Image (tube, grey):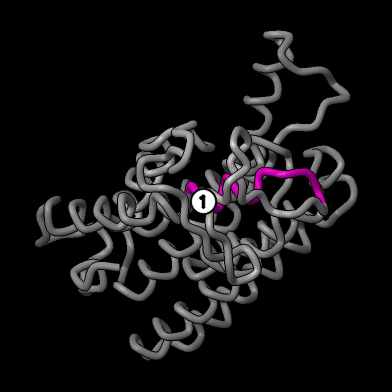
Amino acid sequence: MSASLFRRHSAAGRGMDFPDIGVPAMAVAVASGPWLRGLVFAHSVAYRHPLRRRCPTCGVVAVRVAGRGVLAAAPVDGRCHLCGVPLGRPVGTVEGTAAAVLVVLALVAPSGWVLAAWSWTALLGIALAYVDLAVLRLPDALTVAAGLGSLALLGVAAVATDSPGRWWQALAGGLGLGVLYSIPILSRAMGMGRGDRMLAVVVGINVGWLGLAALVTATVATAAIAAVYTVAKLVGRQLRLTDHVPVGPFILIGGLVAIVRHAV
């Protein structure tokens, strides 16, 4: 990640022009594109199926995967190097999502290390969201990596700002949100699975840094967005009451709403 993104700045970005924040954030998003597209391609498989590595047309290994599925590399141009068939998400879609999210986070993050934690979670969260939309599951490897990475980076942030209580607050936020979404009546109402509850812990860690009010906002926003999406799909007859919906993206968007609302 660009060094300028780690520069300490105020919550509202006062004293810094958009190029100082936005350009490095967009550069990180673009550079992360092959990694994120590789993750989405590799993990968009049914539960307990092996990760995808091969081109579906010619069978050559087109996406390199390592580190228990956390490291991946898709072709920069998004095409199989042998037959030229497009692989996974089109180039620009994942990068565009990442750029938008990272710029927003860069504008509101209270410090560079907090921004690093939020950005790490955001990048893996974007991959998780696209996988959830594709196959209705959230791979444990990516969720665990997001959680451990954000905890470590927020730990550095707590030391750098001499505020160890914030780290414990973040940890409590993760555990609290995980417990909340494990309540059977709420879990069933929102159609949550184990992967969704694990992701809630990760989002809770990042949002918990900002306090209890932010956790409440994240929860309310998640439920509201999920409800609007589900009702719209039901009204449009694109969804039946017995169908499952991808809850992961709602949890992530709810967390982003809470960060924007409470970090400024």
Residue 217 visible in this rendered orientation of the protein:
no
The kind of residue on which mark 1 rests is Gly
Residue 90 visible in this rendered orientation of the protein:
yes
Residue situated in front as seen by the camera: 8 or 240 = 240
Q: Could you tell me which residue is drawn at 74 percent across and 15 percent down? A: 234
Residue situated in front as seen by the camera: 107 or 198 = 198
Magenta span includes 39: yes
Q: Is residue 259 above or below residue 189?
A: below
Q: Position of residue 32 (x, y in %)?
A: 38, 56
Left or right position of 25 against 224: left
Secondary structure mostly seen in magenta is helix
Q: Could you tell me which residue is drawn at 31 percent across and 68 percent down? A: 110
Q: Position of residue 8 (x, y in %)?
A: 22, 74
Q: Is residue 89 above or below residue 50?
A: above
The quarter of the picture where the C terminus appears is bottom left
Which of the 4 quarters of the picture holds residue 153?
A: bottom left
Residue situated in front as seen by the camera: 148 or 221 = 148
Q: Position of residue 173 (x, y in %)?
A: 62, 68
Q: Position of residue 107 (x, y in %)?
A: 26, 55
Left or right position of 68 against 118: right
Q: Could you tell me which residue is drawn at 48 percent across and 88 percent down? A: 164
Q: Which residue is mark 1?
A: 38
Q: Is residue 3 above or below residue 42?
A: below
Q: Is residue 16 above or below residue 149?
A: above
Q: Could you tell me which residue is drawn at 48 percent across and 32 percent down? A: 86
Q: Residue furthest top?
A: 236
Helix or strand or loop: what does disc 1 sit on? helix
Residue situated in front as seen by the camera: 99 or 135 = 135
Q: Which residues are magenta?
A: 37-47
